[in-house]
Amino acid sequence: MADALRTDMGGIGRYRRLASVDVLDPRLTVVEQFTRSRWLWASVVVFLLGVFSLVRLNVILTADIKTDTGTVPGLNSDAMWQSANYAFPTLAVWSILFLAVDRWRPQRWLLWALALFWGSSIAAYGSIVVNSWAAERLSIDQNGNQLAGARAAIYVAPFVEEFFKATVLFLVAFLDRRRLTSKLSLVSLAGLSAIGFAFSENIVYFARAIVYGSMQASTGDVAAAVAQLVQMRGLWTSFGHPLFTSMTAMGLAIGLRSRAKVVRVLSPIAGYLLAALLHMTFNTVASLFPDNYQKTIYFSIALPILAGVVMYAVVQVFREGRVIRYRLSDYVMAGWVPDTYPLLFSKIFQRLRMLVLSPWWGNPLATYKLQRAVSELAYLRDQITRGTVDAAGLWRERELLYAIRDFHAAGALDDARGLKPYWKKPQPAYLTSWAPPVYPGPAGIGGQLPAPAMVSPPLGSAPTQSVVDPRWGPPKA
């Protein structure tokens, strides 16, 4: 394999990068591959921007705001930490759900962390800056009344927030679109970015309620009001941001899997506009409609849309399994993979069973890498058949086939049917090597070990040496 890859890696590597196909250069060491990774430097840039955004957010939110009628106090650290505790369960539950969605070829933890960090820092800071600027422009002639704030929430915030939340998806597609193998993969990243944004937004809402309630004596029971707000935003309407951003993700996924240039351009735009429209409808209902109408719309429109998206995600899980099964069948007909691979690697239960039983019947790390290689091979074959990857994919295809063979030789478990975990019992210690003692010795004493058999001398012959020393006897007086 190494000899086959030590060809002209310079020109071929650039050709493969343009086609968004992974490049493996065996001439580079692990440190060189790490330092030359585009994702390393992209992560550094995103991390620095995220830290800057969080610092600026803290400065903006903690500053007092002077108005014509007085001063609006900023948020304090105690209120923000308390609000973070209230908002964290929603973040944890939705993050686990979106990580569980991406199961066929999961993204690396780095992309998951980048998406979550992007939404909670960069997207939150960019949105609050642009929304505040737009709200000021809309309230010039309104003297800061609530109607102007509602117009900003309805006509500006949906487009701004959906843009910043979905930017990380287009960043991943621009840098390395081969990682976006399916709609589920994109929905997972979009959901993490959206729930990170919702986490930061919930902290601001909860902290403002706490600070306002502590400053105004006429607000009543502050704890009950904050608890009601936490229940509303943290539970009943927590699906809002992930649902909206998922529309952009599905539009981008359709565009990446299409050969038509028109579809590639219009599909992400249509997904973004649909996300903004749903967001706009949600903000309109929350800003202008009374509570009884909000409940009616919630149960008659919002929940059915959410149920439809969940059903669509479930259907996509089974559909991705069929794609893997059909594409692996192509390699079975060519004789390049075993005929059991299409069935076993297209079922989530069988894949999970391999990973669980690999510590007993194989190599866990090799099993995990085998599943990733097989899934990538199937998705690559699907892209080749669709025409979205050109001949550069054949290089990666060969590398994956070599890798599958190497993982199998390293002890990867590729068939767990009929296998069960077992516990190694301690084996009894047996006396394997024993040399009989030299006679006359303790052999035979106590009947534990038999005495070695004596060979009788032939008849008529005398022993050359007495068995017993003739000088031996009792002591003489």
Image (cartoon, rainbow, N blue to C red):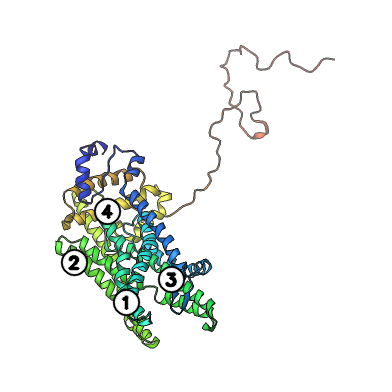
Classify 10 Å Cα crowding around label 1: few (below 14), some (14-19), many (20 and above).
Answer: some
**Could you tell me the amino acid type at mark 3?**
Asn
Marks 2 & 3, CB-CB < 8 Å contact: no
Cα separation, mark 4 vs mark 2, equals 20 Å
Q: Nearer the viewer, mark 3 or mark 1?
A: 1
Closest to the observer, 415 or 412: 412
Q: Earlier in the sequence, mark 1 or mark 2?
A: 1
Marks 3 & 1, CB-CB < 8 Å contact: no
Marks 3 & 4, CB-CB < 8 Å contact: no
| Element carrying mark 2 | helix
Residue 266 disc label: 2
Question: Residue 222 in the image: x percent, y percent?
Answer: 53, 79
| Element carrying mark 1 | helix
Q: Quadrant of residue 474?
A: top right
Q: Earlier in the sequence, mark 4 or mark 2?
A: 4
Closest to the observer, 201 or 381: 201
Residue 138 disc label: 1
Describe residue 434's horizontal placement relative to residue 469 as left or right.
left
Residue 202 disc label: 3
**Could you tell me the amino acid type at mark 2?**
Leu
Residue 418 visible in the displayed image: no
Q: Earlier in the sequence, mark 1 or mark 4?
A: 1
Classify 10 Å Cα crowding around label 4: few (below 14), some (14-19), many (20 and above).
Answer: some
**Could you tell me the amino acid type at mark 1?**
Leu
